[in-house]
Image: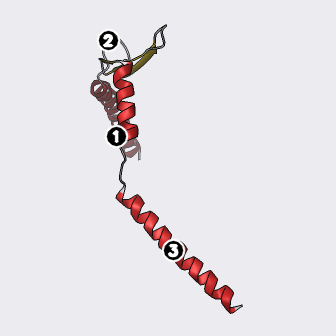
Amino acid sequence: MKRFMLKSILLVSVLFVGVLIGMQKANDGIMDMKGYDDDGFGTPLKISEDETGNIEASLLGQDMGSATISEKKKKLEEMKSFNFFSEIGKSVAGIIKGVAEKTVEFVSSLI
């Protein structure tokens, strides 16, 4: 019984140390994957407004002026997106609504 307990405690200790080493390796891998450097955590998007009210944005280190932001916003507003599933849903809803109205009219004419 003592040998069994000794082996069990030894096995649990080895596995526990393995888990701790694995957690440290995973943490190091995540830090490498995110690309943290010695400068600290960098933000991928920086938005600032100067005294005159101009908005300046920096996306992944590339500067974007307020002109490009407003142009992209205008372009997105002008684009009319077509969603196939939305159109199918609207047509099915219209059919069901029509059938329900006809059914209610038929039942009310019988009463």
Which of disc 3 and disc 1 is earlier in sequence? 1
User: Which marked residue is nearer to the observer: mark 3 or mark 2?
Assistant: 3
Q: Which residue is mark 3?
A: 96
* SS for dot 1: helix
Q: Quadrant of residue 22?
A: top left
Residue 80 place in picture, x, y as percent: 37, 47
Question: Residue at (41%, 43%) from the top-left corner?
Answer: 5
Determine crowd level at label 2: few under 14, some 14-19, many 20+ residues with C-alpha closer than 10 A: few
Which of disc 1 and disc 2 is earlier in sequence? 1
User: Which marked residue is nearer to the observer: mark 1 or mark 3?
Assistant: 3
Question: Residue at (35%, 59%) from the top-left corner?
Answer: 84
- In this image, 52 relative to 12: left or right? right
Residue 110 place in picture, x, y as percent: 67, 92
Residue 93 place in picture, x, y as percent: 49, 68
- Residue 64's disc is none
Query: As rendered, which of 3 and 107 lies closer to the eye?
Result: 107
Q: Amino acid at mark 3?
A: Ile
Q: Which residue is mark 1?
A: 11
Inter-mark Cα distance, 2 to 1 = 39 Å
Residue 39 appears in view:
yes
Establish if 82 lies above or below 59: below
Q: Which residue is mark 2?
A: 38
Establish if 48 lies above or below 103: above
Query: As rendered, which of 81 and 29 lies closer to the eye?
Result: 81
Q: Amino acid at mark 1?
A: Leu
* SS for dot 3: helix
Determine crowd level at label 3: few under 14, some 14-19, many 20+ residues with C-alpha closer than 10 A: few
